[in-house]
Amino acid sequence: MQQSEIKNIASEVYRLTETKLFGLAFGRLRILLKLLQEWWAISRCEELEEVCAQMLRYSLGDYEDPHRDVIISKLQHDIYLLTDDIVEAIATKNFAGYDYEQKRIYVKNQELREQFDFRSVWLKSRLSSEEEGAIISFVANKEVNFASRQMVVSALMLKMLRSYDASVLTIYLELLSDVDSRIKARIMVGLVMILAVHNRRILKDVELCDRLVRLFANQQFVAAIEKVYKHIINTFGTDKVTRKITTEIYPEIFRSGAKIQKMLKEDNVDISDDEINPKWEKAFMDDEGVSAKLREFGDMQMQGADVYMSTFSSMKGYPFFNDIANWFMPFDENQTDVARLMADMPDLLKFFSESTHMCSSDKYSFFYSIAQIPVANFKSMMSGMEADVEVMRDELNSDNWKNNPEKVYVVEVRSYVLDLYRFYRLHPRRSDFVNPFEQIADFKSNELLSECMSVELRELVCKYLFEAELFVDALYLYEYLDAQQVWNAYFYQQMGYCYQQLERWAVKRRNRSCNRASRSSSSAFRRVIFT
């Protein structure tokens, strides 16, 4: 049976279970059991069928059962778990995805089972309560290598996105109050990604859902979630930013560079000379086209746009990135290859290693690209920039962000979101992984995240969705905001454009109270849409 067929059958089991058609659900589940042929799965299925049969006999007896809903919810939850485990077992044996290929190697190597590194955690099946406790202790232990603890947090997210395991969320929630801001940032980003992919499953887990609802009532938690969301929605416009940089900004700079080259030849200048002629510098800076594009680039960077995707997307082919774990590795100056370069040019490269604009993945790309250039040549190239680098380093240090846990959290969230974006867009086997960025904008089916979003954040999300031309998702939020009476001409102009692009001409308006404000807003809506 094909991989897609197995997933479709599992989806049917989930759907039938959710609608309480248990007999049909068990019938579809037996197809998977026949494929797997494992006694543990058959035994668990028979136990659940017996529970279902007893519940049916009890209900036919016309007895009052105040716990009936709880029993049904528990039965649904257990069927979901069994289906997850069966599909994961079949996939481990037969699926062709990169993670399952690696898992087959992992299963053969029994020694990996006792370790808590990225690969062993990522490839584990459902975590036992003992493993759950051990991982919590490992990540919370301040004596353990800091990068290793961060990597385990990332591995848990990747594992959960492959196959639902409530233990991952339990671990995340247990650790939130007892970890460094940088680890907290990874947990919060992972939490948002998991909620985007497994929202419906989490809603069926009553205990876990209640715990999350209590957290969403905490304003500090909601504020931390919103910071994550703002950086995630920034990625919606990355393709547009990349196109603008590659088709408008870079060509303009290259054109001016050619102009400077021409001046060098006319002045018969040795280009190896380190001294910069003010005439050339003035010619470069006085070029209105270049100055405008450089300002535009700087503005995009200050607004949080991903301006480096276009530069570093072609630099992920170094052997370093052959190991999947390295895509999630926080930047470390003590990493072997980086340390070797830092020893040769410590002052010059320190600024780049501490930059808050570059994510860890791009920093590794940068350092590995520099490693291809002879040290003497690179020093010569950078000699004219030392003063500028020193000024930028002073500005970076003057902010004193490293001593502010809140700023550390924001910097780490941005860096980690960009690391994940690089992985899901650039990894050679990216199609083998569930991409949470593709589901993060689906607020219609993501009740948990949608409920915790403020009106202001929804407006910001609308802006990015609209600019990224994700009109279906944008329109859902526009209609929500319309119901909240967030009314202005610009808002309705964008909302109308969404209707136009989706060819939804027959718009059903809500009945509004007939006060002056409502009539005024309806008139504005008609003027914007139909004129």
Image: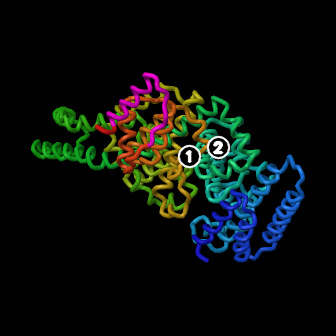
Rate crowding at label 1 as few (under 14), some (14 to 19) or many (20 or more) other CA atoms within 10 Å. many
* Frontmost residue, 514 versus 269: 514
Give x and y (percent) for residue 427. 49, 59
- Give the prevailing secondary structure in the magenta stretch: helix
To which residue does mark 1 refer? Answer: 330
Give x and y (percent) for residue 274. 26, 40
Relative to 221, 509 lies left or right: left
Residue 514 magenta-highlighted: yes
Q: In this view, does 72 lie above or below 483?
A: below
Q: What element carries label 2?
A: helix
Which image quadrant for residue 287? Answer: top left
Which image quadrant for residue 463? Answer: top left
The amino acid at mark 1 is Pro
Residues in magenta, as a range: 508-528
Quadrant in which the C terminus is drawn: top left
Q: Are marks 1 and 2 in contact (CB under 8 Å)?
A: yes
To which residue does mark 2 refer? Answer: 146
Give x and y (percent) for residue 56. 84, 61
